């Protein structure tokens, strides 16, 4: 399978460069094995299998319904290829899947790596139901992972954790980005996005990603998204993380225990370091199904907002006191994956799909809401 990616830069020269690179807009592409056509990306319908390849139709008559020319015997053609079932092991794909001819080869070895396009073969076929990045003109970056994991992303994985393209499940199309974190503390796996996407204008951006967090989930804190950057006026660095944790913290036997979304802020300004917001009054974090996570960092008003499935979970604004937390910063890098600061009773598995970094809110549906 192929993968569609779209990027928008801050000037027309950058946009032209990306048009000429593999970071291209979604568009119809054609397989060379037989005369077939598949729409580039046409919606957000969820599916974990590759759609059938649809032959190009032939006209049966002239305009207005008049009969066309008498048919002639068709030239012999190769039979239409059968749809390729996604492999549970992306490295073992074939015929356009990641790891197969025309696809992308994943490199999930311990310690991280990046995916690279496979050489030769037919062009990658984008699944008809892959998320359409062209619907979001304000997007700074958009990725449905149908071509695997490639630049400008970089991958890091520690202590045996894994980050790779996956055909096990996808929110749209046939592929997603999969992370598995092992049991020891800080067996982290991150997918990192830096320049040219970050820093963003006015230090502001919206992030939208679908995630499938396999249960049962941790009783303590597990982070799924992170940004890092520099505070104004030489105050040092800061970073913020968004994820889920148990509440009361690490007390699963408590009768009121539940799993809530959380936002944590760290700063080199000592009095502003390690501040946590917990969405104790919002709906609990859902495991074992696709959910839509959104994050807005407003660098002009120094405001942070978090939504899950379109419902606001958290909002916090900086009070303009440099000694206090939640001052926004110039983001150097955005990361998504899994980080847990404590030992876990079992492995943590999360799938990410249909990521958009945008100047305006994308929302959880089509059209944007």
Image (cartoon, rainbow, N blue to C red):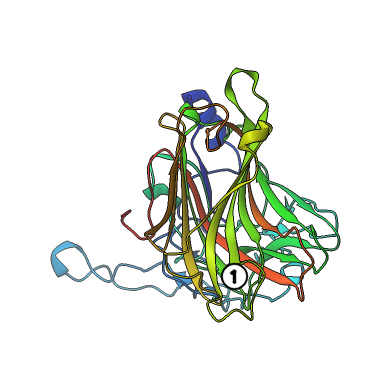
Residue 229, quarter of the rendered image: top right
Binning the other alpha carbons within 10 Å of mark 1 as few (below 14), some (14 to 19) or many (20 upward) gives many
State left or right for residue 294 relative to residue 331. Answer: left
The N terminus - image quarter: bottom right
Coordinates of residue 187 in the picture (x, y in percent): 80, 60
Residue sitting at x 77%, y 76%: 345
Q: Position of residue 158 (x, y in %)?
A: 83, 56
Residue at 51% across / 66% down in the picture? 173
- Does residue 224 appear to the left or right of 138 in the view shown? right
Q: Is residue 137 toward the left or the right of residue 244 in the image?
A: left
Q: Say if 258 sits above or below 307 in the image.
A: below
Q: Residue 335 versus residue 124: which sits nearer the camera?
A: 335
> Which quadrant of the structure image shows residue 89?
bottom right
Q: Which residue is mark 1?
A: 213
Residue shown at the point (64%, 81%) measured from the top left: 253
Instruction: Measuring from the top left, give residue 336's x and y in whole percent.
Output: 63, 53
Element at badge 1? strand
Q: Is residue 283 visible?
A: yes
Q: Toward the viewer: 71 or 106?
A: 106
């Amino acid at each position: 399978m192929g993968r569609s990616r779209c990027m928008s830069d801050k000037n027309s020269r950058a946009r032209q460069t990306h048009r000429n690179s593999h970071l291209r807009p979604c568009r119809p592409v054609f397989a060379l094995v037989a005369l077939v056509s598949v729409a580039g990306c046409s919606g957000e319908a969820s599916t974990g299998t590759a759609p059938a390849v649809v032959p190009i139709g032939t006209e049966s008559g002239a305009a207005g319904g008049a009969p066309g020319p008498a048919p002639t015997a068709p030239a012999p053609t190769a039979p239409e290829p059968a749809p390729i079932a996604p492999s549970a092991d992306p490295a073992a794909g074939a015929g356009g899947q990641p790891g197969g001819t025309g696809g992308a080869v994943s490199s999930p070895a311990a310690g991280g790596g990046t995916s690279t396009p496979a050489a030769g073969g037919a062009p990658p076929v984008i699944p008809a139901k892959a998320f359409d990045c062209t619907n979001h003109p304000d997007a700074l970056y958009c990725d449905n992972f149908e071509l695997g994991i490639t630049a400008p992303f970089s991958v890091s994985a520690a202590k045996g954790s894994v980050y790779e393209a996956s055909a096990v499940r996808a929110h749209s199309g046939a592929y997603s980005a999969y992370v598995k974190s092992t049991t020891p503390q800080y067996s982290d796996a991150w997918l990192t996005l830096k320049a040219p996407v970050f820093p963003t204008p006015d230090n502001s951006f919206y992030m939208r990603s679908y995630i499938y967090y396999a249960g049962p989930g941790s009783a303590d804190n597990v982070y799924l998204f992170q940004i890092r950057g520099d505070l104004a006026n030489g105050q040092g660095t800061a970073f913020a993380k968004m994820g889920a944790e148990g509440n009361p913290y690490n007390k699963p036997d408590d009768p009121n225990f539940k799993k809530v979304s959380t936002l944590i802020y760290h700063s080199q300004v000592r009095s502003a370091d390690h501040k946590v917001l917990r969405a104790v009054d919002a709906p609990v974090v859902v495991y074992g199904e696709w959910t839509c996570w959104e994050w807005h960092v407003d660098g002009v008003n120094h405001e942070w907002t978090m939504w899950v499935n379109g419902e606001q979970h958290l909002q916090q604004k900086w009070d303009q006191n440099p000694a206090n937390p939640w001052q926004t910063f110039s983001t150097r890098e955005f990361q998504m994956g899994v980080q847990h600061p404590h030992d876990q009773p079992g492995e943590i598995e999360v799938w990410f799909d249909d990521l958009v970094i945008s100047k305006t809110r994308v929302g959880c549906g089509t059209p944007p809401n």
